[in-house]
Amino acid sequence: MNIVVCAKQVVDVGEIKVNPSSGKPMLEGIPKKISDIDKNACEEAIKVREKVGGKVTVLTVGTPDAKERMKELLAMGADNGVLVTVPDKADHLVTSTLISKAIQKMGGADLIICAEASIDQFSGQIGPRVAGLLNIPQLTYCYKVTAEPQKLTAERNLGDRLVTSESSYPVLVTVTKEVNQPRLPSLMQILGSAKKPIEVWGTSDIGAADLKPGIETIDIKGVAMSRKNIVFKDDLDESVSKLADSLSKEGLLG
């Protein structure tokens, strides 16, 4: 079975600070990492391979330095990697198209596993878009995946209900963080990941040199947050009453 894991290099969102004068996020110098839920996706791919056999390929659309982050997933147990260098301007249309064309260049995949979303934008668009471009079934928001040689069964959290779905191959699956606990590679696995191949493809290599984004990002600003700092100094019962009344006026109580 050919299994592809889609992974993204992101900035560590916990380290982002907002410039108080401009309101813009300060991204320079922030360490980068593989998006958290992508590690769950890779873990699930490895578990499927361990059960039914096959090969796990990590596919990333990003800048050349993403190769170093991809090695984290190779150390976990993925077999090889493919990095598609991203154009200067890329939206979800560009990214999903590059992923789908890269998978086609690989000769297709039986199983594609994505995170439900990346931790930086959390749009949840890439997996469904790729499935649509490849014209294959998709099972989204999976918190449990059971792979068999001829079919895949997934338990899915759709918010107001839990659904069990089944699909033949090929199929694209997006997983939630609850699907598993990613393994921690050993020192020998980390050292061994340097020997695993990572191919680097440009947009022309996959027939997407003229790809243009459908959306233009004009500006990015942080959300300003401020507290009202209201302090109630009356006796306890009266303070509780005033607090409840204040919260009700703000629409925070039903």
Image (cartoon, grey):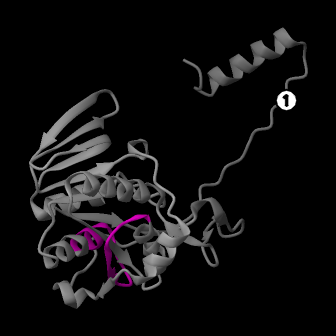
Q: How many marks?
A: 1
Does 210 appear above or below 38?
below
Does 87 appear above or below 180?
below
**Which of these two is toward me, 64 or 4?**
4
Residue 95, image quadrant: bottom left
Question: Does the stretch in magenta take in 96?
Answer: yes
Quarter that holds the C terminus: top right
Does 179 appear above or below 113?
above
**Magenta segment:** 76-97
Confirm whether residue 167 shows in the render. Answer: yes
What residue sits 59% from the left and 26% below the top? 252
User: Farthest residue toward the top?
Assistant: 237
**In x, y percent, where is residue 223?**
59, 55
**In x, y percent, where is residue 137?**
12, 51
Residue, disc 1? 231
Horizontal placement of 114 versus 25: left or right? left
Residue type of the residue flagged with mark 1: Val
